[in-house]
Image (cartoon, rainbow, N blue to C red):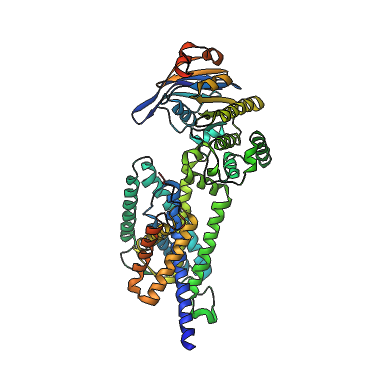
Amino acid sequence: MLKLVNVQSFYGKIQALKGINLELHEGEIVTLIGGNGAGKTTTLMSISGLVKPKFGEIIYRGQQIQTLNPDEIVKQGLVQVPEGRRIFPDFTILENLEMGAYLRNDKAGIKADMDYVFGLFPILKERIQQSAGTLSGGEQQMLAISRALMARPKLLLLDEPSLGLAPLIIKDIFNIIKQINKEHNTTIFLVEQNANQALQIADRAYVLENGEITLHDKASVLLNDESVKKAYLGMS
Amino acid sequence: MQALNESGSFFLELFFSGLTRGSIYALIALGYTMVYGIIGLINFAHGEIYMIGAFVGLTVAGILSILQFNLIAILVLAALFAMVYAAAYGYTIEKVAYKPLRGSTRLAPLISAIGMSMFLREYVILAQTPDFVSFPALTEGLFDLGAFSSMIQPTELVILIFSFLMMAGLFILIKKTKIGKAMRAISQDREMAMLLGVNSDRMISLTFMIGSALAAFGAILISAHVGQINYNIGFVVGIKAFTAAVLGGIGSIPGAALGGIILGLTESFATGYVSSDYEDVFAFGILVLILIFKPAGILGKSTTEKV
């Protein structure tokens, strides 16, 4: 479905990605784990078109997309929930969700999808007119995921959805991610530092270090891999 | 009793002339504040767009009056042409002077804006004239005010009505439409808006075009009221409108409208009750006071530092 071939991205003169190769198949949950500064966010921003790779190709369903603008990439169904949720604080919950459906005009479909996300996160419905800046971190993450779902993603890119959240809420969020994947056959690319949780719901995983993929395998295999355990799971 | 009546009607006269002036400041301040809200730039060339709008209106009115169009048709077409022309200028200025500098230091586009402002003024001096030229009284015959004419002139009433209609239109656009929502989303988090499919370049262009068209519209109305224009009118009004935008809270659209009205009224009362020499002292004095006690402006949010 999505293929990155030798993707190299730079921030100014600093090379953040040193030739990334990875592939996602339709309907999968794939996770990309790695430490701070490994290049996880740059990978997602390169896919979304906010960072333009200097070399390499990003191929989505047979088409090169690395030169497209972010809005054109969203139009193709690649939607990102960026790190830190980045909800629009001055908008209400409803307005945030409407922004998610920015490119759509099918009123009935938008309404149906809104009901769907309210089913996933009932708390959002209760606070529909509340300004989003007043929500707690967990609620903001729920809103950020819901907002992305309003764009009807075929591929959902999630950047550290667990960041700064309480363990119980993290569990909820990961369960919902799995549920979205099952119910809509939405392909999920999950970038995480929280490797343990991510590996438990993912089908396959890539390990990113210093802008390079150092390991990739089935998630269940990496969960028991000694080096991964040591570096990312806090076990020895 | 007579004296009271006189002072009462003097007050109303000052009030309406202040309101008129203020509504023009507001129209132009909206251009400053919209651009600041969306890309965090003070567009110092905005006043010059206003000035160019006036010159385009003058040219169109001149041609149409030779062709013996009636006054209403001349007014409508002159305003329309001026707005379209100004929008094209706004679009081009953004593409030429600001877009290439996006992502560089904050100072660079500011200097570019000042340069653009100077360039446009010099350009009009060379292409048109360095002197004042008279502007036809297009709006004079629009209303017959009869007994009220001592309080407000017909040309002022035209300014009041149409600038408020324009502002109401803009508020609806910003509050109720998808375009307006996209603009507000960009002003909160541009990258995030892009990640949801907003074409931010197009929205930025649109913002410049709308702000420029509003300024040109204001220029036609005020020029028809004042009766003369030159290359420098944009600079003077621009500074005042910018002050109004800061007063109301730059980045805030209702703030720009409110700031403009407050500034216009302040100037008018200062002129009437003190002396016209002190007009600017009061105008900027009130700005200083607001900035001391509410640094973000009347309706501005103190927490957001736009980058």
Q: Is residue B107 above or below residue B69?
A: above
Relative to B195, residue A192 above or below: above
The number of callouts visible is: 0
Q: Is residue B82 visible?
A: no
Q: Nearer the viewer, residue A86 or B128?
A: A86
Nearest the viewer among B220 and A15 is A15
Across and down, in percent, residue B65 comes to 47, 69
Q: Furthest-bottom residue in view?
A: B2
For image coordinates 57% across by 34% down, the residue present is: A145
- Image point 53% across, 25% down: which residue? A190
Q: Quadrant of residue A125?
A: top right
Across and down, in percent, residue A185 comes to 64, 25
Q: Please tell me which residue is depicted at 58% across the width and 50% down the height of the picture.
A: B177
The x, y position of residue A162, in whole percent, is 52, 29
Quarter placement of the C terminus of chain B: top left
- Judge whether B148 appears above or below B252 on screen: below
Is residue A141 placed above or below B107 in the rendered structure?
above
Q: Position of residue A195 (x, y in %)?
A: 51, 21
Asked whether the viewer can see residue A6, the reply is: yes
